[in-house]
Image (cartoon, rainbow, N blue to C red):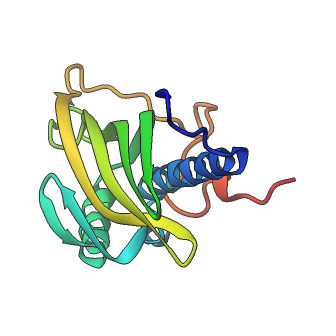
Amino acid sequence: MRVGQSNPSLEAQMQALVDKQTIYEVVARYCRGVDRLDLELVRSCYHPDAAEHHPGFDGGRDDYIAWIGQGLPRFEGTMHVIANHLVELDGDRARSETYVNAYHWAPPYDDADANFSTGSRYIDRFERRDGEWRIAERSCVRNWVRVEVGSGELQVPTAENGWPAQKRDRSDLVYAPLR
């Protein structure tokens, strides 16, 4: 803080923390929705008039949901891992930069188009409308892509090998009621 600047009130600081956490949770819900193929969860992260700029896609929210709804099922699985996350608040608007590592896999495991990881950043413009933070515009900036082929082998969890297996729908363990 510079000399002469007033110190924000504790209430204002607390509200900023709540707003930043709320925005982070929107990004986390988006990643869950993509990985679980829960397209309604993905939709809920965007305002209805939101714009999405993604490698291979540029358009509105509903067209984006339809696009990923066609492309994602070809994968046996995806996993989006959130790393750095920075939010800059400006009243009822915010800019969020989120570093994401995304992993994609599908048989045959030696197919470069179906088995890759990518390091990307989501540059989001958030808006709070009617008290709710959602994405108003997203640009997905791809920093790198790594093709994940080689031996053609990938260990996938199954009931037979004793590992808990993911489900790419609402039957996944994460949707189970809390006990």
Q: Total marks drawn?
A: 0
* Residue at 19% across, 59% down: 53
Tell me where residue 99 sits by quadrant: top left
* Residue at 20% across, 43% down: 141
* Residue at 52% across, 35% down: 157
Tell me where residue 67 sits by quadrant: bottom left
Residue 102, given in percent of the width and then of the height, sits at 34, 38
Q: Nearer the viewer, residue 105 or 12?
A: 12
Q: Is residue 24 above or below residue 86?
A: below
Q: Is residue 62 above or below residue 83?
A: below
Residue 120, given in percent of the width and then of the height, sits at 26, 38
**In the current view of this chain or complex, which residue is farthest to the top?**
151
Q: Is residue 7 above or below residue 71?
A: above
Q: Is residue 42 above or below residue 114?
A: below
* Residue at 24% across, 76% down: 63
Question: Is residue 106 in view?
Answer: no
Residue 4, given in percent of the width and then of the height, sits at 50, 33
Residue 28, given in percent of the width and then of the height, sits at 51, 49
Q: Is residue 133 left or right of residue 34?
A: right
Q: Is residue 142 left or right of residue 36?
A: left
**In the current view of this chain or complex, which residue is farthest to the front?**
4
Question: Is residue 116 in view?
Answer: yes
